[in-house]
Image (cartoon, grey):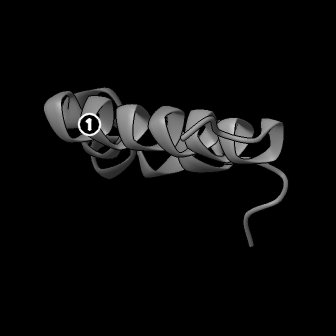
Amino acid sequence: KAAKPTEETALTKAKTFVNTLIKLLRHPHKKKPTRLIHPNEKRTHAKPSLP
């Protein structure tokens, strides 16, 4: 089966998403502990899209 361009894009996005999740799971100390230890910096590092 030859994948359609749209399917290839979806697969690429899915792989990137999974890789990002794996990186976050392998290196959780880069994100959450920093926010827990320094709650005042949470506003600075938080993305504008997040509430």
Classify the position of the C terminus by image quarter: bottom right
Tell whether 16 sits left or right of 27: right
Residue displayed at 37% across by 32% down: 19
Say which of 43 and 27 sits in front: 27
What SS does tag 1 mark?
helix
Classify the position of the N terminus by image quarter: top right
What x and y, as percent, mark residue 34? Answer: 33, 36
Tell whether 20 sits left or right of 14: left
Residue displayed at 29% across by 29% down: 23
Q: Quadrant of residue 24?
A: top left
> Which residue in the rendered view is the most extreme toward the bottom?
51
Tell whether 20 sits left or right of 29: right
Q: Quadrant of residue 41?
A: top right
Tell whether 13 sits left or right of 47: left
Mark 1 surroundings: few (<14), some (14-19) or many (≥20) residues within 10 A: few
What x and y, as percent, mark residue 48? Answer: 84, 52
Q: How many marks?
A: 1
Residue displayed at 39% across by 42% down: 18
> Which residue in the rendered view is the most extreme toward the left?
26
25 w.r.t. 26: above or below: below
User: Residue beneath label 1, please?
Assistant: 22
The kind of residue on which mark 1 rests is Ile
What x and y, as percent, mark residue 17? Answer: 50, 42
Residue displayed at 26% across by 37% down: 22
Say which of 13 and 32 sits in front: 13
